[in-house]
Amino acid sequence: MILRTATPNDIPAILALERTPLAREFVGQWSEERHHATLSGGDALYYVSERSGAVQAYAILRGIQETSCAIELKRIVVATPERGLGRSILKELMRIAFRELGAHRLFLDVYEDNARARHLYESLGFQYEGIMRDAANRDGQWHDLHLMSILESEYR
């Protein structure tokens, strides 16, 4: 699997992945401008996975400049789920967060009804921390998000 740092030229492919029907169900929809601002803002890292020159997945780590050493996995979107790519990418992101960026804690939030993602996170050692009530609006309806994290000591 190839995971590389994304560039502004990858944003059209990132937007296309984000707008697929499955991703729209579980991932917030950002504008092109917001992705450009986040990518260039200095506190986030974007990664893409390619196959035959086409972007198959992307991920965003945020909070890389925080003194708390807590990094957020803001996004992970895979074009074709249930083929193991998401698991491989998540393992690599965990390695990057803990080994390269010196994170103490890697955290994320996930829609309550996204059982597939919650199962993946749990299988890799993420712990459930609680519910963020009505934290995300999807199609005009408020939804709870589950907060999950893994500590560096648990990763080792």
Image (tube, rainbow, N blue to C red):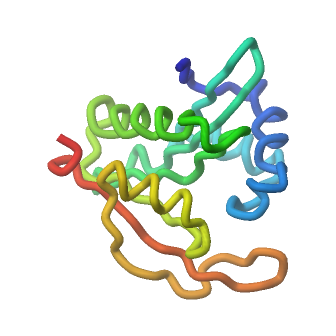
Residue 10 picture quarter: top right
| Residue closer to the observer: 64 or 130 | 130
Query: Seen in the image, is 51 located left or right of residue 33?
Result: left
- State whether residue 114 is above or below residue 64: below
> Does any portion of residue 52 appear in the rendered image?
yes
Residue 7 picture quarter: top right
Query: Seen in the image, is 46 located left or right of residue 155?
Result: right
**Where's residue 156, x and y in %?**
17, 40
- State whether residue 143 is above or below residue 21: below
| Residue closer to the observer: 140 or 82 | 82
Residue 37 picture quarter: top right
Query: Seen in the image, is 26 located left or right of residue 130?
Result: right
Query: Seen in the image, is 132 located left or right of residue 7?
Result: left
Q: Residue at x 48, y 39 (%)?
A: 87
**Where's residue 146, x and y in %?**
48, 74
Q: Residue at x 57, y 43 (%)?
A: 60
**Where's residue 12, x and y in %?**
84, 34
- Looking at the image, which residue sits at the far top? 52
Q: Residue at x 60, y 66 (%)?
A: 114
Q: Residue at x 64, y 27 (%)?
A: 6
> Does any portion of residue 67 appear in the rendered image?
no
